[in-house]
Amino acid sequence: MNKENQTKDDVSEWVILLHGLGRFRQSMRGLEQHLKRLGYSTINLAYPSTTKTIETIAEMHLARAVQGCEAQRAGKIHFVGHSLGGLIVRQYLQRHSIPEGSRLVMLSPPNQGSELVDLLIKFPLYRWITGPAGQEIGRGTESVVNRLKPVGIDVGVIAGNLSINLVFSAFMDGPDDGMVSVKSTMLPEMRDFIIVPNTHTFIMRDPLVIRQVANFLKHGKFDHSETG
């Protein structure tokens, strides 16, 4: 959908992109540029992933971005979140509604909690580096994932199964991307799910993943002919 070809009957579609824990908005730049070329308006959100709780980020930073889309009379507001970014969107949707037809794509999200965090949270250095949000994505009683309810929009999940960190992989159950197990990414209410041969760190830059994100935003499903 190119902006030049839009008619007055078309709705304005925005995409808010959220990077992962300890990352920066630049990590989502390639994906953002591709979506812009397809005619979407975008907000590549920079947020303090290592100094605030997930709820605070959702209610302050993401809420402000959504309000910006609403001010532009967005007909649909989509989200693409890498890892922690996807959980922030789920947290936001616990209290807020968005236009009908809006969608969420999650890239390597620890939807069931991270086995790796359960291990690392015991170490002060991990807690210091990752901050409050990094301590909320495990599987324990304090984990955010244990209190999030199903969201009311179409959700697509993309998981990676390529790891270059065999030490971390040894502590995870089944295939993983070096940081999050494939099993942990799954969400009961997800509409579609695919696995790609990529790592947690670089999954958002994979041309295949970028195409799949665009396909889900447009059609509400992935193109499984590309992934087998």
Image (cartoon, rainbow, N blue to C red):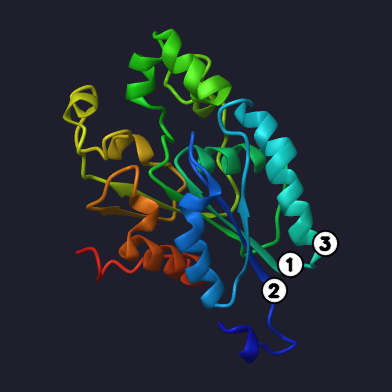
Task: Quickly name the residue at label 2.
Answer: 12
Task: Quickly name the residue at label 3.
Answer: 71
Identified by mark 1, the residue type is Ala
Residue sitting nearer the eye, 37 or 110: 37
Q: What separation in Å lies between label 1 and label 3 (alpha carbons)? A: 8 Å
Tell me the element at label 2. Answer: loop
The reply to whether dot 2 and dot 1 touch (C-beta < 8 Å) is yes
Q: What separation in Å lies between label 2 and label 1 (alpha carbons)? A: 5 Å
Q: Is 148 left, or right, of 188 in this rendering?
A: right
Q: Quadrant of the N terminus?
A: bottom right
Percent x, y of residue 141:
50, 14
- Residue projecting furthest to the right: 71
Q: What separation in Å lies between label 3 and label 2 (alpha carbons)? A: 12 Å
Against 223, is 176 above or below?
above
Residue sitting nearer the eye, 194 or 31: 31
Which residue is painted at 45% across and 8% down in the image? Answer: 124
At label 2, counting other C-alpha atoms closer than 10 Å, the crowd grade (few under 14, some 14-19, many 20 or more) is: some
